[in-house]
Image (spheres, rainbow, N blue to C red):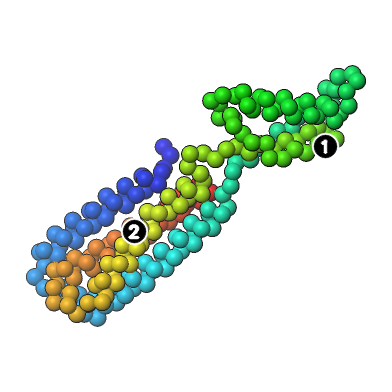
Amino acid sequence: MKLRASDLAALFEVYMLGVALAALKTALDAHASWFSETASFWVYAMTFLASVVLLSATSAAAAVLSRTTGPEVGHRRMATAGLEPSGQSKEDTAEADIDELLSSLEHRGPNPGAGRLVTEVKRTTAGTMVRVASPPSALGAAARVQLTLMGPRIAAGVFCTLSAAFLSAVTYFQAQYTINNLAILILSYGWGGLVFYTIASLFLAGRQA
């Protein structure tokens, strides 16, 4: 079974849902704050910094992988040796072969090769080399890379936003120990899932590039 970006996103969402429900149950059962103000501060600060680094790394990886993608290019060699009719030069035969190739590409109809573009023609002693570029698919390779890495970037942005919000009012949330316990548990246990999700998405995007 081929793994897709939507499959990774679904697995991460299920994991985060389980973490959130378990953290909520634990936080509601607690009768005091489990974390000191200093510990809370460092949890939020480190989560914020790590999320910024992760967001920057995935954005840079998406940009690099998108640049390495390009149209699928194939080669087709048409040998001319021994195919020239009497009275025709090699140049005439090569032009006839090119015309035949263009005609065959135009009449393929719904086949995968239909609509291909001849981008380069080279004549060598062995024959005529025609470079044929396939048309871009409905979703190009660069777009697939961006889409694959979009999920980890959104998740890292959410982690960054939540940790920044709690970091700016760590003293207030320390008094609201249920919310503080819930936030720290979600960020702490969810971070491992985010890292795994990002690594798997980078691997998938690298295969698509």
Helix, strand, or loop for circle 1? Answer: strand
Q: Residue 146 location in percent, x, y?
A: 45, 52
Q: Identify the residue shown where x is 44% and y is 65%.
A: 56
Q: Which residue is mark 1?
A: 124
Is 75 located above or below residue 46 in the figure? above
Is 194 located above or below residue 114 in the figure? below
Q: Identify the residue shown where x is 23% and y is 57%.
A: 19
Kind of residue at disc 1: Thr
Q: Identify the residue shown where x is 31% and y is 47%.
A: 10
Q: 10 Å neighbourhood of mark 1: few (<14), some, or many (≥20)?
A: few
Q: Nearer the viewer, residue 45 or 91?
A: 91
Instruction: State the residue lying farthest toward the top.
Output: 86
Residue 207 in view: no
Kind of residue at disc 2: Ala
Number of residue marks: 2
Instruction: State the residue lying farthest toward the right.
Output: 87
Q: Residue 142 location in percent, x, y?
A: 51, 49
Q: Which residue is mark 2?
A: 155
Q: 10 Å neighbourhood of mark 2: few (<14), some, or many (≥20)?
A: many
